Image (spheres, helix red, strand yellow):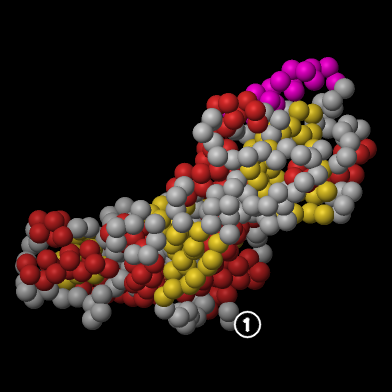
Amino acid sequence: MTATVCTPLYAEWLALHPTHPVHTGRSRGTPHEGPVLVAGVAGALVEGIAAGDLVVATEVEDVRRGRAVPCDAAAFVVGELRRLGFTVHAGPVVTTDHVVDSAAERAVLAACGAVAVDTESALLAGDDGRTVVVRAIVDTPDLPLRRVGMPWRGARALRELRRTAPVINAWRAATGEREVLLAAPRSFCAGVERAIETVERALERFGAPVYVRRQIVHNRHVVDDLEQRGAIFVEEVDAVPEGAVLVLAAHGVAPTVRVQAAERHLQVIDATCPLVAKVHQEVRRYAANDNTVVLIGHADHEEVVGTTGEAPDHVRVVSTPAEAEAIQVPDPARVAYAMQTTLAVEEASETAAVLRQRFPTLKGPRTDDICYATSNRQAGVRAIARRSGLVIVVGSQNSSNSHRLVEVAEAAGTPAVLVDDAGDLPLDRLAGATRVGITAGASAPPALVDELVNCLSGLGPITVTETGEPAEDVRFVLPKEVTRP
Ligand code: SF4
């Protein structure tokens, strides 16, 4: 399979990359097989796109032939360009058989959903979704072609286009056939589904705005989506108007937060995951019997902050076996332990083993507190990591369980990368990666995995295999405030 680059700057670009194996397909009207990247200039159709900006097509439409083809790898290229500092817009690009300059014609094309117009992309695009289109904007609705300054704008657009060469190189290196191994289970767990549905139902029942303390779950996409639907995320309770509806996030809170909410007469809906609430309960019980509670976890994680708040005078946080070795307690005969729910299973077990050795009467949960979803996802990624050249974990940077998935893959000897979405994945990570494993943290929406797989298919043919355990059937009941009649 050969990747093809089509651009008016191709000769110039090829001179910079003399060993480049691609061949050019500059003949107009000849759609290409396999990955093709079409780079050139275009006119903007909508407000908000300026001369010199770049547009990457999510699909290209040929108005004369009534043909539209998707550009499946667009998100990869958009992300790569943005990381290099380009101003990039993504959207449909339409190809016409003449240069469009009148306001009326721009408006007609914009009304069809296109954001930019050119005269060649659709003619070169294949039907397989493996076309990438990058256009530098020369003219806009406000600054049409015949307006003063056009030569300067044209030169600027071409200059921007030349600067995209590293991205074109990275795209080319990433193209090729590959095998995709999907870990099972992956993505949303029962606690995350419950928390998201709680906010959705609160919005339905009480109307916007509904306030949420901190991120309802640690995922940027989930938060953005709920924000658009009327949720307002706040750091602390004092940012919520008196009497408003407040949802507490899945990670749980310290009792002091509930007190603050009561003082402001807030209508509190608790979306704390029941498995986190269970750990809170254990800590309260141990502390009530005057035990020192060693909480295995990451001290700055919201879940640990909330759990510690149940008995701050009794809880000591350790995160590693070495810290467990070093911890001093007032009475070694009165020690208990609990765990953050999203730890790496093996390291947490080692830490607990050190505590058991040091404190023979150590009390602890009947089964460790690491939740079923964390354990299952770690087992799933371990299974695909051994067979993959690269593991991609979909999840946000503040997602603890997603970070643990990266660590588990790396411990299996496979490089791994954590990405918020397809656009977050550096293309150079895909160069030479012919077998890619994919999983997602418990707070990452499944649609992001689908989008990533689709983007990979835009770089070349893929075969997709799912490996692991059958789907989980755990469900938690919703808080009564959003269910009772
Ligand atoms: Fe609950 Fe586990 Fe999901 Fe956390 S990862 S919300 S503890 S089910």
- Three-letter code for the amino acid on which mark 1 is drawn: Pro
Q: Position of residue 221 (x, y in %)?
A: 55, 56
Left or right of 277? Residue 116 is right
Q: Position of residue 179 (x, y in %)?
A: 49, 62
What residue is drawn where x is 64% and y is 52%?
34
Judge the density around disc 1: few (<14), some (14-19), many (≥20) Cα neighbours within 10 Å: few
Res 342 → quadrant: bottom left
Q: Nearer the viewer, residue 25 or 134?
A: 25
Q: Which residues are magenta?
A: 147-163
What residue is drawn where x is 16% and y is 71%?
336
Q: Position of residue 28 (x, y in %)?
A: 79, 40
Magenta stretch: residue 160 in it? Answer: yes
Left or right of 151? Residue 37 is left
Residue under label 1, please give it: 485
Determine whether 59 is above or below 149 in the image: below
Q: Nearer the viewer, residue 300 or 132?
A: 132
Observer able to see residue 34: yes
Where is the C terminus found, in terms of image quarters?
bottom right
What residue is drawn where x is 44% and y is 73%?
467
Q: Position of residue 376 (x, y in %)?
A: 37, 73
Q: What's the magenta bit mostly, secondary-structure-wise?
A: helix
Magenta stretch: residue 75 in it? Answer: no
Dot 1 falls on a residue whose secondary structure is loop
